[in-house]
Image (tube, rainbow, N blue to C red):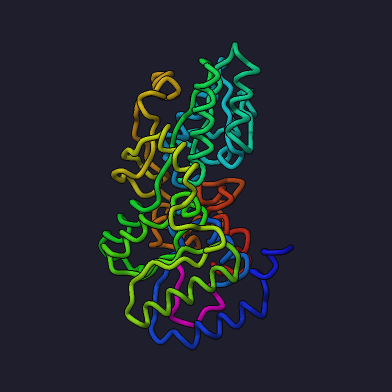
Amino acid sequence: MKYIDEYRDREIAHKLLAQIAKRARHPWVLMEICGGQTHTIMRYGLDELLPPGIELVHGPGCPVCVTPLEMIDKAVALASRPDVILVSYGDMLRVPGSKSDLLRVKAQGGDIRVVYSPMEAVRIAQSNPQRSVVFFAIGFETTAPPNAMAVWQASRLGLTNFSVLVSHVIVPPAIRLLLNQPGNRVQGFIAPGHVCTVMGASEYEALVREFRLPIVIGGFEPVDLLQAVLMLIAQLEDGRAELENQYSRSVLAEGNLPARKIMEDVFEVCDRKWRGVGPISRSGYRLRREFATFDAEQRFGMDEAGVDEPAECISALVLQGRKKPPDCPAFGDRCTPQTPLGAPMVSTEGACAAYYQYRRHSISR
C-alpha cells in the first residue's frame, strides 16, 4: 500500500539500525509517549534490534489507560440506569472500574452502544428523544475536536437529552510532571504524532527550552520510529536539545487550525486526574460554561469520590515509564486481557496489552 509499505521496508529499517549503532557512543534512555508507538515497537521488536545501552521506556500515552478509575465508575453508574443510553468507543468496555466494567453492565441489560464517531451518539439522541443519551468523551487532544463537534452540533439541534461524560487529557503537562519527578531517567522523547497533527509543535518547543532535552515528533510505523530514535541519538551525542519533526508528512507547525478552533470553542483547560499518575494541573479539558448543560456529571448530580487502584497492579509505574509490564508479578497470570487488573492490559494502546500480545511467550518466570 502506497505510503505504508515504504515505512515498513526491511532494508530501510536495517540501514537506520546501522546508523543508530554507528552514532550511539553512550547509553541513552528514550521514551515514546503514544501507545500506538508502543505497540509498533513490540510488534516489530524494535527495542530488541537497537544497540545495547539504548533503552526504550513507555509513557502515559494510552488515553484509555489514563482515564481515572473514578470516571470509569461514573460511566458504569450511568450505564446502569434504565433511563440512560451510554454511548462509548469500544475499547472502554473492558476497562475495569472499582467494582465492575461496562461490558458486564451491558451483559446485565444496560443499554450501552459502541460507536466509531461521536456524531453517531448525536444521531442516537435524535432517534431516542424519550431517553437520556450520554457519550463517554475520553482521549487526548486527538479525539477532543470530534467530541467538541458533537456537543456543538447537539447545541445547534437543541437536543436536551444529549450529554457528555468528559475525561479529556492534554499530553505536555504529563511530560513536564514526569521530567520533574525524582529519579527521572528519560533523556529524550518521541512525541505523539497524532496529537501534534491536531495541536502543532509549539507546546513541545517550550518543553525543550525548559528541560534542555531533545524531543522528536514521531510517526507510528517501524521506519518512523527508528528514524525518530536516530534523530534523538544524534542530538544527544552532539549535546543538542531541539524539537524536530520526523512525522512531517502529517504534522504542521501550527497543527490543524479548524480542529483546534472547534475544540477551543467548546472546551476550556482544567486540572485533571490521570489514572496511574495522579492529579496534574491544567492537563485536561472540560466544557465551557456556555455548554455546561451538556455536562453529564452536572446533569446527573455525580459527586467526586476517590477510589484506590488494586494493590497488586503496577500500572501506575508502567504508565510513568518506571517499570515495564513483565516486572509485574501478576502479568500473564492473574492479569490477562480476559482478567485485567488494570486498564493497560485491555486497551488496544496499552503497554501491558502489547507485551501480552507480542512477548508473553518469551518472558520467563
In the image, residue 67 sits, relative to residue 192, either above or below, namely above
- In the image, farthest residue toward the top: 130
In the rendered structure, the answer to whether residue 108 lies left or right of residue 52 reads: right
The location of residue 122, given as percent across then percent down, is 59, 25
The location of residue 334, given as percent across then percent down, is 54, 51
* Residue 236 position by quadrant: bottom left
Q: Quadrant of the C terminus?
A: bottom right
In the rendered structure, the answer to whether residue 364 lies left or right of residue 312 reads: right
Q: Quadrant of the N terminus?
A: bottom right
User: Residue at the location (56% across, 15% down)?
Assistant: 83
Instruction: Give yes or no for residue 53 being in the magenta stretch.
Output: yes
User: Residue at the location (55% across, 39% down)?
Assistant: 92
In the rendered structure, the answer to whether residue 271 lies left or right of residue 24 reads: left
In the image, residue 249 sits, relative to residue 20, either above or below, namely above
Query: Can residue 342 be seen in the rendering of this structure?
Result: no
User: Residue at the location (49% across, 42% down)?
Assistant: 258
* Residue 357 position by quadrant: bottom right
**Residue range highlighted in magenta:** 47-56
